[in-house]
Image: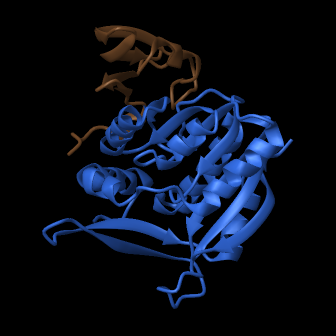
Chain colours: A blue, B brown
Amino acid sequence: MKEGTDGTADRSVRETYDHIAEHFATTREYPWPEVRSFVAAEVDRLGELDNAIDLGCGNGRHTQLLAENGASVVGADVSHGLLKEGQKRASEREFIARWVCADASRLPLRSDQFTTGVYVATIHHLRPRSARIASLDELARVLTTDGQALVSTWSTEHDRFDETEGFDTLVDWTLPGGRTVPRYYHIYDPDEFQSDLDKSALDTVKMEISSGNCYAVVEPQL
Amino acid sequence: MKESLLDIICCPIDKHDLELEVDEKDGDEIISGTLTCPECGETYPIEDGIPNLLPPDMRDEVTA
């Protein structure tokens, strides 16, 4: 995989996920408990869910969770292959969602329209850092002024990493048959993640570490 | 995609509203077609009912 500009890197991540989409989807069955908790908190906060965005929706497990909790959901992902898995999931499990192939740092979505956002396990695939911060600015732009979102990233707090400062790495995905496909990750350290959130147009409502991931509940700066 | 998605999406580059041209429909579901930004002239394909709104520098290679 080439080192280089964000365009090059993002194409590589997209191609990787297009390639592994079907197998990846079979291993991404259930919503994460942290996302379940956030969605439950959103139902409490709003009374009922309204328009929601699942950014980096993958095969749509959290898109489904949002839809089943009453949201009108847009699932956005860079990989057409994963979006097709999402479409298939929606048709098999009878939930309604709208799917858009998009770059998280240049969203093709109008401003000020989502009251709830989920942007989990995605920002760590973007590079360089300016693209990651741009994606946080884009999230702030598409949220309504009273909107909130959950942002998560893989972090140095995970048991498999010895590093204490954020770093770039490639993590292999093993396909059935044993062939591996590398995926780019920026593994954040928690202070660095907070610093990138602070540089963006988002305010942090709360931040926690769970299962080796950093989770931030955020809202647009007013 | 349904035509109502036009109320939500925009050009990823200049955030302008998009114009729709339909090639194939199944009921009210648009299966294939083209979205055009009248501001910058960029076009975005709809494939398998999914609008591909990646900026042009990210979709110049065929997907796997």
Left or right of A134: which side holds A50? right
Q: At 54% across and 37% down in the image, what residue appears? A: A107
Residue A113 sits above or below residue B34 on the image: below
Q: At 61% across and 48% down in the image, what residue appears? A: A118
Residue A161 sits above or below residue A73 on the image: below
Residue A147 is situated, as x and y percent measured from the top left of the image, at 76, 40
Residue A46 is situated, as x and y percent measured from the top left of the image, at 80, 38
Closer to the camera in the image, A89 or A18: A89
Left or right of A120: which side holds A50? right
Residue A29 is situated, as x and y percent measured from the top left of the image, at 41, 55
Residue A221 sits above or below residue A194 on the image: above
Left or right of A101: which side holds A174? left
Residue A163 is situated, as x and y percent measured from the top left of the image, at 54, 88
Closer to the camera in the image, B64 or B41: B64
Question: In which quadrant is the N terminus of chain A drawn?
Answer: bottom left
Question: In which quadrant is the C terminus of chain A drawn?
Answer: top right
Q: In which quarter of the image is residue A173?
A: bottom left
Q: Which residue lies furthest to the front in this view?
A: A93
Q: At 47% across and 85% down in the image, what residue appears? A: A160
Closer to the camera in the image, A185 or B37: A185
Q: At 20% across and 46% down in the image, what residue appears? A: B64
Q: In which quarter of the image is residue B33?
A: top left
- On the question of residue B40 being in view, the answer is yes
